[in-house]
Image (cartoon, rainbow, N blue to C red):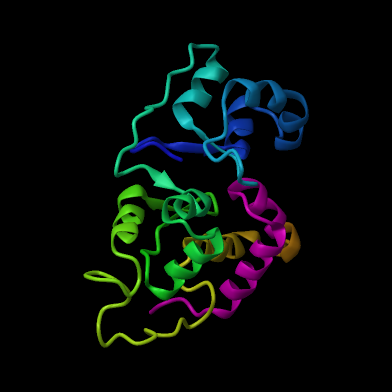
Amino acid sequence: MIPRNRPVINEADIAQQAGVPLATWRRRDAPAFRQRIPSLFPHSRIRLYDEAQARAYLAGQPIPQLPSTPHPEDLLNDEEAAALLGITASTVRAYATQGYLSAGKTLYSLRVWPRHDIEERRTNPPGQGKGGGRPPGTGQGPRKAHPYQDDPRLHTATQALADAGETPRHRIAETLAQQHGGSTRTWERLLTQASQTSPPD
């Protein structure tokens, strides 16, 4: 969970601030760092940290405490949302795709939702009472032009292609995965989509 209004940072950015390559930081510095600064999503493969805590650690300053009281603006990942709703994480993602739940937002390739969106869906499950399911008349909704439509990572991939020159695409994908999280394969797919998607007029 990301407490409300708390900026986050990933390990690539932490290594950059520490002035060392990411691989070096993970091998040499990460074990001690992770003991002091817990990941905000401990069960996720994408490690995100509270930025203020990370900066304090790097500066050798006291580590600030995170808020412990739940707030409607807290950001939850799919597993945390699923626990509140009593469903699986894959169902949460499906709800977001099908319009039963807001699309959320993406931070470092991790999709998160405000707690109030999840609690509202818990109060009004799909097809049950006011607010349940899609609005009348929407049917299945418009089809996406491609799987990554509206994914903010697509813009990142497009910009990376524009800046990369003759760099092989798999190298670009590796760099993006290190900088923003996610797998190299996912970024390769995003780069492929970015190369096929015409920019808007």
- Residue at left 35%, top 71%? 126
Q: In the picture shown, does residue 18 fall above or below 117?
A: above
- Residue at left 62%, top 36%? 11
Tell me if residue 186 is in the magenta stretch: yes
| Residue 181: % across, % down | 61, 49
Q: Which residues are magenta?
A: 172-201
Quarter of the image where the C terminus is located: bottom left
- Residue at left 65%, top 46%? 45
Image-based side of 137 in relation to 16, left or right: left
* Picture quadrant where residue 98 is located: bottom left
| Residue 115: % across, % down | 35, 48
| Residue 153: % across, % down | 52, 61
| Residue 130: % across, % down | 21, 70
Q: In the picture shown, does residue 195 fall above or below 122?
A: below
Residue in front for this viewpoint, 9 or 34: 34
Tell me if residue 39 is in the magenta stretch: no
